[in-house]
Image: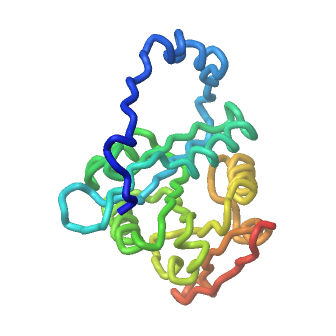
Amino acid sequence: MAHIDKSELKREKCLEENKIRIPELNSRVRKKFPKQKKNQDALRILLINLSGYFSNKADTQERVLMEPPLGLIALQSYLDREFKEKIHGKIIKSRMDFDNYLEMIKIIDDFKPDIIGISVMTFYKNFLHRTTKYIRDVGVKTPIFLGGPYTTGDYENGLQDENIDLCMLGEGEITLTDLIRRMINNKNKLPSYNELKQIQGIAFLQKTSRKTSEKIIENISCTP
């Protein structure tokens, strides 16, 4: 198509590994960024990326997204900088760190998070809702919040899932930092509705009364 003749393609030898290898890279990285000691009462945050179906072929997709969850990595790095030893975060990705619901639940049971955050693209929204239903069906009561393109663009639909507690809108660093700070002050529990209404960048539902299941959106303001 490009009308390139084979004679125009130059053959280049691969670079010699010993010329590009960085000596003691792992140990130097660990020295620069040592593991922070975690308090026993540190708030535990489990961040899950669901941008990839399980390999059982029950779902089909054009391609398998196996790139690192950079958004969650950036988010966790921001939280680590802000809270240090006060939090303990863990990031997992579907199909890579768990390839079925049982493996996912084992990670949740072993880690014992105080809050679970799930990042998902709109393409995988049905997979997301099946996953949150499974989490609740096996008895996990940990608060769950959603983030990513799906809920930023369609939080109203996301909140129709009764298994979801909150939706994060936009990038999320400032919003989640505010939520986590309030949780730490509340003994690692979700703050009251009155406090949630003060957090910019979230959407959530609140029961209109104790005797009805009707819910209303309380706060949908976005972080600047």
Residue 49 appears in the picture as rendered: yes
Give how far across and how far down residue 216 sits, in percent. Answer: 63, 86
User: Which image quarter: residue 175?
Assistant: bottom right
Q: With 197 as the anchor, is 39 left or right in this view?
A: left
Residue 105 appears in the picture as rendered: no
Looking at the image, which is closer to me, 27 or 94? 27
Q: Is residue 66 above or below residue 2?
A: above
Q: Is residue 60 above or below residue 213?
A: above
Q: Is residue 20 above or below residue 38?
A: above
Q: Residue at x 53, y 78 (%)?
A: 159
Give how far across and how far down residue 221 sits, in percent. Answer: 75, 75
Q: Is residue 45 above or below residue 192?
A: above
Instruction: Indicate how the structure is coloured in the image.
Output: rainbow
Give how far across and how far down residue 162 sits, in percent. Answer: 46, 76
Give how far across and how far down residue 98 sits, in percent. Answer: 32, 47
Placement of the C terminus among the 4 image quadrants: bottom right
Q: Residue at x 61, y 79 (%)?
A: 205
User: Which image quarter: residue 35?
Assistant: top right
Q: With 124 as the anchor, is 201 left or right in this view?
A: right
Q: Residue at x 39, y 42 (%)?
A: 8
Q: Residue at x 67, y 66 (%)?
A: 170
Placement of the N terminus among the 4 image quadrants: bottom left
Q: With 7 as the anchor, is 164 left or right in this view?
A: right
Looking at the image, which is closer to me, 161 or 154? 154
**Total label count?**
0
Looking at the image, which is closer to me, 222 or 40? 222
